[in-house]
Image (spheres, rainbow, N blue to C red):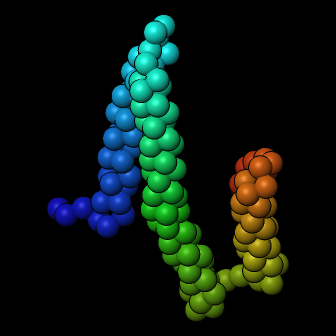
Amino acid sequence: MAKSKGAKKVTEYSRAKEALERQKETLDKTLETSSANGASEQAKKAAQHAQSQYDTSKANVNRLGFKQIGGARTTKAIVSIRAIGKLANRRAYNFGESDVAKIIGLLKDETKSLETKFNAALSGTSAAKSDVSVSFD
């Protein structure tokens, strides 16, 4: 059985994270060597350069993870919302205005919460987490 596109991307992200971990180990060794008594100026510059490369690699890996995992989760959310929309079939389901209002309200609230979390992250603050539980009477 072939891997799905999503599975391939997660594997690519996992490999990038593993490479970053190896780069971190090398960086730690370089920093250890450069901080030893009597380390040359060249060793110190090499450590600074290694730190800069590591920071850039880490930012790239984090961006890759966001793009790949964020894309997959967004697609999954849209598919789920479309599935909820299929509940609007009156031939198959019995529902009232209050049921519809509840679903729409919950989705709007969660979308607003999502926006708040991203805005908080962009501004450097934190947003509260909340549990989800839905029931219809």
Q: Is residue 38 left or right of residue 96?
A: left
Q: Residue 46: x percent and y percent? A: 42, 31
Q: Nearer the viewer, residue 48 or 78?
A: 48
65 lies above or below 77: above
Give the residue at x 75% y 77%. Answer: 104
Query: Which image quadrant for residue 33?
Result: top left
Count of numbered marks: 0
Q: Residue at x 41, y 24 (%)?
A: 43
Residue 56, percent from left and from top:
49, 48
66 is higher (above) or lower (below) than 79: above
Q: Quadrant of the C terminus?
A: bottom right
Q: Residue at x 75, y 65 (%)?
A: 115
The answer to which quarter of the image holds residue 20 is: top left
Q: Is residue 102 visible?
A: no
Q: Is residue 53 left or right of residue 116?
A: left
User: Residue 122 versus residue 27: which sits nearer the camera?
Assistant: 27
Q: Quadrant of the N terminus?
A: bottom left
Q: Name above or below for residue 103 compared with residue 69.
A: below
In the foreground, 87 or 78: 78
Give coordinates of residue 71: x percent, y percent. 49, 67
- Nearer to me, 69 or 50: 50
The residue lying furthest to the left in this view is: 1
Q: Farthest residue toward the top?
A: 37
Q: Is residue 111 visible?
A: yes
Q: Quadrant of residue 25?
A: top left
Q: Residue at x 80, y 48 (%)?
A: 125
Q: Position of residue 84 (x, y in %)?
A: 60, 77
State left or right for residue 39 relative to residue 107: left
